[in-house]
Image (cartoon, rainbow, N blue to C red):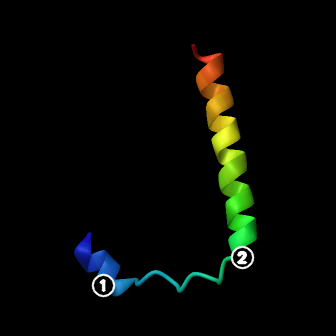
Amino acid sequence: MELRAATYPDPPCPPVDEAEAARMLARFRELEAGLAAANR
């Protein structure tokens, strides 16, 4: 795996909007909580 990583480095990540990231994280946590409640 190290050889592949050295041969094909990951492309640089685009800049992330902090507010957008926070919204996505909050939505993910809501979905996760909903799934946890449904599986109880």
What residue is rendered at 71% in x and 56% in y? 24
Residue 37 falls in which quadrant of the image?
top right
Place of residue 6 in the rendered image (x, y in percent of width and height, measured from the top left): 30, 84
Place of residue 30 in the rendered image (x, y in percent of width and height, measured from the top left): 69, 39
* Marks 1, 2: nearer the viewer: 2
Badge 2: how crowded within 10 Å, few (<14), some, or many (20+)? few
Residue 15 falls in which quadrant of the image?
bottom right
Place of residue 19 in the rendered image (x, y in percent of width and height, measured from the top left): 74, 69
What residue is rendered at 64% in x and 27% in y? 35
Instruction: Tell me: 19 left or right of 9.
Output: right
- Residue highlighted by disc 1: 6
Q: Secondary structure at mark 1?
A: helix
- Of labels 1 and 2, earlier in sequence is 1
In the image, residue 37 above or below residue 31 = above
Place of residue 26 in the rendered image (x, y in percent of width and height, measured from the top left): 69, 50
Quarter of the picture holding the N terminus: bottom left
At label 2, the amino acid type is: Asp
What residue is rendered at 46% in x and 80% in y? 10
Residue at the limit of the structure toward the left, as seen here: 2
- Residue highlighted by disc 2: 17
